[in-house]
Image (tube, rainbow, N blue to C red):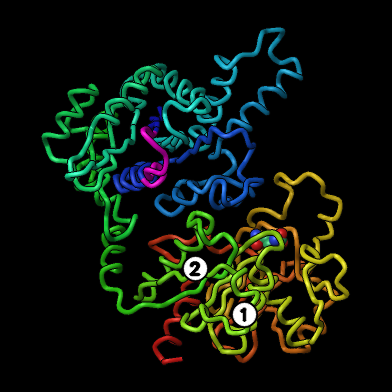
Amino acid sequence: MNKFIFVSGGVCSSLGKGVAASSLGALLEGRGLNVRMVKCDPYINVDAGTMSPYQHGEVYVTDDGAETDLDLGNYARFTSSPLSRANSITTGQVYDAVIRKEREGRYLGRCVQVIPHITDEIKARILAVAREDPDTDVVIVEIGGTVGDIESIPFLEAARQMIHESGKANALSVHLTLIPEVAGGELKTKPTQHSVKAMQEMGIQPDLLICRAPVMLDEATRRKIALFTNVDPDAVFTSYEVDTTIYEIPVVFFDQKLDQVVLKKMGVESRHANLKPWYAMMDRFASRKGRVRIGIVGKYMELHDAYKSVYEALFHAGLECGVEVELVKIDSSGLEETDRPESLLTVDGVLVPGGFGQRGINGMIKASAWARQTGTPYFGICLGMQIMVVDWGRNVLGWEDADSTEFNQNSKHPVVSLLEEQVDVTNYGGTMRLGKSETVAEPGTRLLAAYGNKHIFERHRHRYEFSNKYRKEMTEAGLKIAAMTPDGSLVECVEWPDHPWGLGVQFHPEFKSKPTAAAPLFRDFVAAARDRGRSGK
Ligand code: GLN
């Protein structure tokens, strides 16, 4: 029988629920359990694909092409849970499915209601993940939002029903709260007390509390929280501020015996804990020497979550290359008016990440041209590769109006243009080229050197492509086409000739990077930037 752990949050958002749920997943995997991760998002959007990164951070893409919440990225980095469309449940999907069934007459004349129809749909989706693989031991279900939100009520109600139906040992509630510090350094437990009351009003008694606090809670504070919340004192844990990395959180929880308490409450016999990969990662973290400055030139620079997987992948690459990666966030719009890109002068490498829309494009092209001309390592991802192609058209071939048709439909040199099948698309949800597909690397390329295998499988999320019409002129002028789709129809990677490391890919390697195994292209890019920095440029 599967076990379920529902992770909810209270007091306020952004407490690191995704990292807490993922860390719990990592610990249970360390104990040899087969874990699946699920995210419930209370928003009405069917998926995150149509949302601005400013609204909800990056869109994380799965192998099967689902455009999901960025927490799935956390699950991918901390655990080995398979992740697909099924692991991301939104209010939009649930209502969409229920309304379709209603239109098909499948409710046999009954009045369709939140309870039981919406909650049944939510439960069915969670159970479907549990049943995908008969070997699944535990499904960790993270419920987005904060207890008390109107939108999350059906999800908490579904959790309540599942806890009740599964029985105590088979379903746990883990609730994450905030312990704020007031003037004088005093830690306050009242918001946690209220938050647990809000859970109890929903009919759920949390089994474990994870309290986000500036420092480790002392015994007296834990006892006080326990007294007011009906939670055992040994089940009150602290997620304190670490000054290292979020990847230390599994170890922080392990040291407090969080996994032991979970196993005991679920009636699972204690097994040997293997945290070796996490300790090894922390050793690598501590032994990094020197610093590499990577300029990320994009348009959503104010919001760290907008390029979350890219930043994490750079960090992973730093672990592998033995250096600290300093993120220099450069708003591309700011580069547009200047001839001397001051912010670029002190970076060791330039990365242009994925993106949509016109704003700041010319600044990115400037950054690409600058990196190309100064021999600065450059890594283009998706839009960042298209930028390399536009730069090559404009500044090497001299076609002043070279552009992507995403930005200029009247260009006489549309070097990047709409995929054939995208021409008539008017429905913007889930209709891009999405998900995992094969790329075949050419011999003698940096791409092949990075992967060590010419068959590369990475994820895509884009509508526009290198325009094949210009392939001949572009390559005759020296641009190297480093990879294609297996049928030879689409360009997947370009590289600059005679350059220390200038490469752009149409896919998104950041989604598969892990702290214990950096994505190969990030690793080689950071290594190139490190070597250039060390050689004094
Ligand atoms: N806007 C570009 C396209 O749709 C790039 C997309 C991306 O970078 N993810 O092709």
Mark linked to residue 329:
2
Report helix, strand or loop for mark 1. Answer: loop
Give the left or right position of residue 477, taking residue 230 as reference. Answer: right
The circle drawn on residue 338 is 1
- Residue 537 screen position, x and y as percent: 46, 91
Dominant secondary structure of the residues highlighted in magenta in the image: loop
Q: Position of residue 423 (x, y in %)?
A: 85, 55
Magenta residues (range): 9-19
x and y percent of residue 447 in the render? 59, 76
Quadrant of ligand 1: it is: bottom right
Q: Report the front residue among 184 and 297.
A: 184
Residue at horizontal 80 percent and vertical 79 percent from the top:
471
Q: Quadrant of residue 69?
A: top right
Disc 1 under 8 Å from ligand 1? The reply is no
The answer to whether residue 295 is above or below residue 397 is above
In the image, residue 17 lies in the stretch drawn in magenta: yes
Of residues 390 and 301, the one drawn nearer to the viewer in this rendering: 301
From this viewpoint, which residue is outermost toward the left? 220
Identified by mark 2, the residue type is: Lys
Whole-number angstrom distance, CA of label 1 to CA of label 2: 17 Å
